[in-house]
Image (cartoon, rainbow, N blue to C red):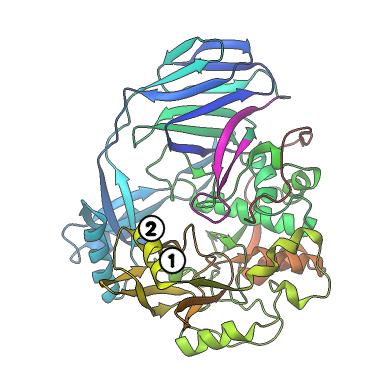
Amino acid sequence: MSPKITVGIIDNQDYARISATGNLIITSEDRVVLKGEKPVIEARVVGSRPLPSVYKVFLKEFKTIQEAEKFARGRCENCGIQEVGRDLVDDGKVVFFNRAYWLYTGEFKNFEDAEKEKLRLEEKGFNPWIREEFKGIPEGKISLKLDDGRELLLEPPVEIYPCDDENFVVVYNVFIGIGYHWQHTQDLYFRGILRLLPGKRGKLVVVNELTIDEYLFSVNSSEMPNDAHIELLKAQTVAARGTVLATMKKHHYNDPFDICHDDHCQDYRGVGRERKNSIQAVFETEGEVLFYGDEICDTRFSKICGGIAESFEHVWGGEPKPYLVAVSDTLIDVEIPVNTEEKAKKFIDSNPPAYCNLNSFEKIPEYLEFAKPFFRWDVIYSPEELGKIFKEKTGYDIGEIVDIVPLARGDSGRIKRLKIIGKRGEKIIDGELNIRQALHGTTLYSSMFYVIKKEGKIILKGGGWGHGVGMCQIGAAMMAESGKMYDEILYHYYRGARLKKVFEGLKKAPRAPENLPSKKIDWEG
């Protein structure tokens, strides 16, 4: 049997519309409230309010609480320890655990104070990170308005699931690619149970509970097209499985689910993305993940590395991970690292042949055509336009942008600290993702860029799509198309790692669903 996980589908939303492809069951307080009907339901939370929150600055991760306490002793009077992660249980037995202990230096009422503490710790040589944490337990009831006019007011958690295994629950207008240039909504169909809860911000949370295998049937072909090469889908499956096991209840330790459905964790679009080969990829890699020594690998991945994969610590802080280091994806020798202005500019301008540079190949499969423009790209702004975007995205009004000055780069040339200079002030932005969000109406393709000021315009000349850490998905696709097997692909991007089976999978493959609305490729923008 494949262990179960919980996936956040909706978080902090006013309402959700839910139904099923067949008759459904609704339960509350372990009793059946409704059975054998197929209504369209509008779900809301009533009688709830947002919880207070604080910001924590985390200093370091430890495997045991004793190690965390020993490190803090004599160094930090106000330090606290946050336990994150959870046990993975299969048929009543713990088959894996990813528990960790994060040492934090204090709690701050606002982000600005937390950011100052983070900068202070960076000056001491640490790689700290910030998390917002909510205090207390959400209250409220779940209101379900049925399309025949009935209203049910129920104690949470409320669970909704189909009457049989041949049907699925559907959530209408789910947001996908939140904050990115391909953001849109789509009706998504799910296996397993939907659980409805009041959230920490006083609004609705919808969680999908299902087995890891059922989850992966969708993820491998939500993250990449479902008609992709089978060896790519197998590599994607192993990487996605590792991401689940390494990060469950870490990115979302303060939430009622293990991971979320969107790009923040990894892309999960429900059964509408499943195909015969996406299910085959899960069965042919049954229970496999990558280990580095006795540690499970946090197998991050991004769309296009731009020629060099980035090192973990330059994107997320924390300790370096020896299997998530700068790796060349190019077909020629290139210098690594490219962490100075001169080296980064030279690398971006060189436009080297690489697995993820689709213009390097005479012929590529149709499913990869969308990715051609993203290996190297330009984004052009007027100073006024960029100043307005910066104000809208950050809240800081520094007027027309006069200059953009990179202060620190990672090994791939991605900027991790940046000064924005305007006519009315200046601001320093820390973090690869924060930089991308501050300089674009949605999110800039990557922070691997340099600045050109020409004819009154500000030009960001860059490369790559995403944070660049771990497996380069488009590079992996071309490796598969070039005859590489999934283990060769994984070992290329995750250096020093080795495959290991950690649990048994489902014994019987489900039939790939038919006649559900779906798109082959709907995340390219």
Q: Which mark is residue 198?
A: none
Q: Can the viewer see residue 287 in this picture?
A: no
Q: Position of residue 260 (x, y in %)?
A: 51, 44
User: How many numbered tags mark residues here?
Assistant: 2
What range of the chain is rendered magenta? Answer: 167-187
Q: Position of residue 267 (x, y in %)?
A: 59, 49
Is residue 191 placed above or below 454 in the rendered structure? above
Q: Quadrant of the N terminus?
A: top right
Q: Quadrant of the C terminus?
A: bottom right
Residue tagged by mark 2?
393
SS under mark 2: helix
Q: Position of residue 409 (x, y in %)?
A: 44, 78
Is residue 509 placed above or below 181 in the rendered structure? above
Who's the residue at 53% across and 73% down the image?
325
Q: Amino acid at mark 1?
A: Leu
Contact check, label 2 and label 1, Cβ < 8 Å: yes
Mark closer to the chain start, 2 or 1: 2
Other-residue count near label 1 (Cα within 10 Å), few / some / many at <14 / 14–19 / ≥20: many
Q: Position of residue 216 (x, y in %)?
A: 66, 45
SS under mark 1: loop
Is 78 left or right of 382, judged from the image as shown?
left
Q: CA distance from mark 2 to mark 1?
A: 8 Å
Of 513 and 69, nearer the camera is 513
Magenta-drawn stretch contains 508? no
Q: Residue furthest front?
A: 455
Residue tagged by mark 1?
439
Who's the residue at 48% across and 90% down the image?
342
Who's the residue at 20% across and 51% down the image?
109
Is 320 left or right of 166, judged from the image as shown?
left
Of 224 and 165, nearer the camera is 224
Q: Amino acid at mark 2?
A: Lys
Other-residue count near label 2 (Cα within 10 Å), few / some / many at <14 / 14–19 / ≥20: some
